[in-house]
Amino acid sequence: MSYVTLRTTTAQQRFSLVVRGEHRVIRDLLVLLARAFELRDTEGVRSIFGEFASFAGPHFRYEEEVLHPAFAGIFGPEYGDKLRVDHEVAITSAERLEELSEVEELTEDEVEEAVWLVHTILPHVSDFEGPGLIVELLNDETLESLLRAREAARRDGLDLLTWSAEVRGQ
């Protein structure tokens, strides 16, 4: 006997495609950023970091404002706290990456630190695959709300560090 019958709705499919696509973009930008640091391509580092921060800001925002609270009903409130801590690590790492992106001549230690910082952010991207499955348990109303929050965050266009400093804690 089956206790749970899941059907995949259009909202689930749309949200899953959106969030997975965004995580892929973030992953690719981070890999490119680490490589640019390794090559000491300071112009590339600044450009890629800017793209990462611009893209990640709206993404982190709608995750924290709508997705994490939606997960609380399934995982419990502690999981939301864990996800917020994961974001804290990513934001703190990004703040330091921004500082390093302004260095004109990177030392070996700075390159190693930058690559290490990128590696502290990358698990957030890969670790989402598990919770990504839980999205299938959210109702269509919640998923539509997530998609609306995503669009609003993208319209606001705050980069990761601006959003973190000006909106996140309020």
Image: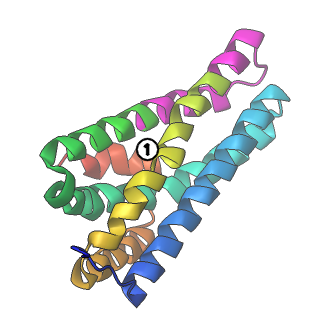
Q: Which residue is mark 1?
A: 161
Q: What amino acid type should be assigned to the residue bearing mark 1? A: Leu
Query: Residue farthest to the bottom?
Result: 10
Above or below, 102 against 133 in this view is: above
Where is residue 1, by image quadrant?
bottom left
**Residue 134 is one of the magenta-drawn residues:** no
Range covered by the magenta-colored residues: 91-114
Is 93 colored magenta in this rendering?
yes
What type of secondary structure mainly makes up the magenta span?
helix
- Is there any visible trace of residue 123 in the rendered image? yes
Q: Residue furthest front?
A: 1
In the image, what residue occupies the spot 50% across and 72% down?
18
Q: What colour scheme does the image use?
A: rainbow
* Whole-percent x, y for residue 142 in the image: 24, 77
Q: Is residue 114 above or below residue 144?
A: above
Of 75 and 106, which appears nearest the observer? 75
